[in-house]
């Protein structure tokens, strides 16, 4: 187990390459189960969620070859092996094994997923969708049992706009008999990415990226090659870092329209943002002023960048109100920011940030992936050394973080936890 050490106050300058999107990768890998011949996925990020999914595919009999950013998945010998425990509990996206295995084998047993603890994260809409397609679904001792004699297309209205449910229903429906219509579907770019892969495999999907998706089921899906879109959340994280303590930072290999809400908010606080075809250049403004943020479904401001943006706002003048309408308990980073001298308090589903604070290095713990990003941003801005533990969360979603930040001029390194720290980590 490791912790991250950051010597704050060093200005970031230069270029950073954005990796493939975590939230696409973790759906595309299970999607390969649906094919009858090898699927090649390129531009994969080197993150622990990807490694876990590769292992899960091996557990069900798949052969998975990895070569740097490329993964070749051989689904020919996969079977509907029950996965009630173990790795499935270590990541959120293991829920996509339900849709993919149900679509392929008409049965699956998958333990309830893990992932970031952001308060309750129900999967009732996934289950509603599977049932509408004809599956019998039961929850037995923390695992979801799914079984169908056949899946039949259906009209499914999502009561909550859900990324996971939209993708999971697509995965199950591509090999169902007849037409499925998902209404009130999520519109995130990752959904289009998954639909693109499935279409290359021979699926018939229309409307991905809008709130109505139509899927005409097919009997067979074949292998293909697919390259993952850039990670808009990683891009947004570096944009926020650059606004916090950058001189001139070029964020390369991105799709600027995917981060428009972040660009808009950075400009509002006084950051200079130059948008090009596939890159964005951020220059820190002279003085930052507070803004209010409200997280919304895409194309609104992403909940996954709410925590990192809160750290940036501690350095802005005036009061900012950050409201999370997607996860109202996503504020575990706030106590840790206070340890570093920030004036932030949580009221209901909002964090109230009073700027401008000068942060001091401290020992802090990342409770989840983006809390980790938030604390790293605070550490980059703070005086002195910040130690961030809970790195297993950060490693779920940021490829080569220290390397990328060191190349930009940050002083950041990883150290092994000592015995006492390992004990504390176990109790956290
Ligand atoms: C692996 C992955 O892609 N994770 C992302 C995905 O998570 P995830 O797919 O889990 O998030 P959802 O879009 O499903 O959740 C959105 C909201 O709907 C609620 N809900 C969801 C499903 C359901 O069946 N019932 C229900 O009530 C959730 O509690 C939440 O309040 O989208 C989130 C919202 O953009 C992001 O924060 C996560 O990074
Ligand atoms: C919440 C996140 O991830 P997950 O849904 O995989 O837990 C995230 O990426 O910020």
Image (cartoon, rainbow, N blue to C red):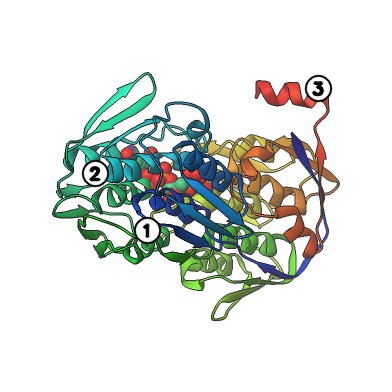
Q: Residue furthest bottom?
A: 277
Return the disc, 2 or 1, that comes first in the chain's sequence. 2
- Horizontal placement of 350 versus 168: left or right? right
Rendered image quadrant of residue 331 = top right
Cβ of mark 2 under 8 Å from ligand 1: the answer is yes
**Residue 159 circle label:** 2
Q: Is residue 50 above or below residue 417?
A: below
Q: CA distance from mark 3 to mark 2?
A: 46 Å
Of residue 377 and residue 399, the one placed in the foreground of this image is: 399
**Residue 150 circle label:** none
| Residue at 55% from the left image edge and 77% from the top image edge | 278
| Residue at 34% from the left image edge and 45% from the top image edge | 100
Q: Position of residue 321 (x, y in %)?
A: 52, 49
**Residue 420 circle label:** 3
**Residue 191 circle label:** 1
Q: Is residue 307 above or below residue 223?
A: above
| Residue at 43% from the left image edge and 54% from the top image edge | 28
Mark 3 burial class by Cα count in 10 Å: few <14, some 14-19, many 20+: few
Question: Which marked residue is nearer to the observer: mark 3 or mark 2?
Answer: 3
Q: CA distance from mark 2 to mark 1?
A: 18 Å
Q: Is residue 282 above or below residue 376?
A: below
* Count of marks overlaid on the render: 3
């Amino acid at each position: 187990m490791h912790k991250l050490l950051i010597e704050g106050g060093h200005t970031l300058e230069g270029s950073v390459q954005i990796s493939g999107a975590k939230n696409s990768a973790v759906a595309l890998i299970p999607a390969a189960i649906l094919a009858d011949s090898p699927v090649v996925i390129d531009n994969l990020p080197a993150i622990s969620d990807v490694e876990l999914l590769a292992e899960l595919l091996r557990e069900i009999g798949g052969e998975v070859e990895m070569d740097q950013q490329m993964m070749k998945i051989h689904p020919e010998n996969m079977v509907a092996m029950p996965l009630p425990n173990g790795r499935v509990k270590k990541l959120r996206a293991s829920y996509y094994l339900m849709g993919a295995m149900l679509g392929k084998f008409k049965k699956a047993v998958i333990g309830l997923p893990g992932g970031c603890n952001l308060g309750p994260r129900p999967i009732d809409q996934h289950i509603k969708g599977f049932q509408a397609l004809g599956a019998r679904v039961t929850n037995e001792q923390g695992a979801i049992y799914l079984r169908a004699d056949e899946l039949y297309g259906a009209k499914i209205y999502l009561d909550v706009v859900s990324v996971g449910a939209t993708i999971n229903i697509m995965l199950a429906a591509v090999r169902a008999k007849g037409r499925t219509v998902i209404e009130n579907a999520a519109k995130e770019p990752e959904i289009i990415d998954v639909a693109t892969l499935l279409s290359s495999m021979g699926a018939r999907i229309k409307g991905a990226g809008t709130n109505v998706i139509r899927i005409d089921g097919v009997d067979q899906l074949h292998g293909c090659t697919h390259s993952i879109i850039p990670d808009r959340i990683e891009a947004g994280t570096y944009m926020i870092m650059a606004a916090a303590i950058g001189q001139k930072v070029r964020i390369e290999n991105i799709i600027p329209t995917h981060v428009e809400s972040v660009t808009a908010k950075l400009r509002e606080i006084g950051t200079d943002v130059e948008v090009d075809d596939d890159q964005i250049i951020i220059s820190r403004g002279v003085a930052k002023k507070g803004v209010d943020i409200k997280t919304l479904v895409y194309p609104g401001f992403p909940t996954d960048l709410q925590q990192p943006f809160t750290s940036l706002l501690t350095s802005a003048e005036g009061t900012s109100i950050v409201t999370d309408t997607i996860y109202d308990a996503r504020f575990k980073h706030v106590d840790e920011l206070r340890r570093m001298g920030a004036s932030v308090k949580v009221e209901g589903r909002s964090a109230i940030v009073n700027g401008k604070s000068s942060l001091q290095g401290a020992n802090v713990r990342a409770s989840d992936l983006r809390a980790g990003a938030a604390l790293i941003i605070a550490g980059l801005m703070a005086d002195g050394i910040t130690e961030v533990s809970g790195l297993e969360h950060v490693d779920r979603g940021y490829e080569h973080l220290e390397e990328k930040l060191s190349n930009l001029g940050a002083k950041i390194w990883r150290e092994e936890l000592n015995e006492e720290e390992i004990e504390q980590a176990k109790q956290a």
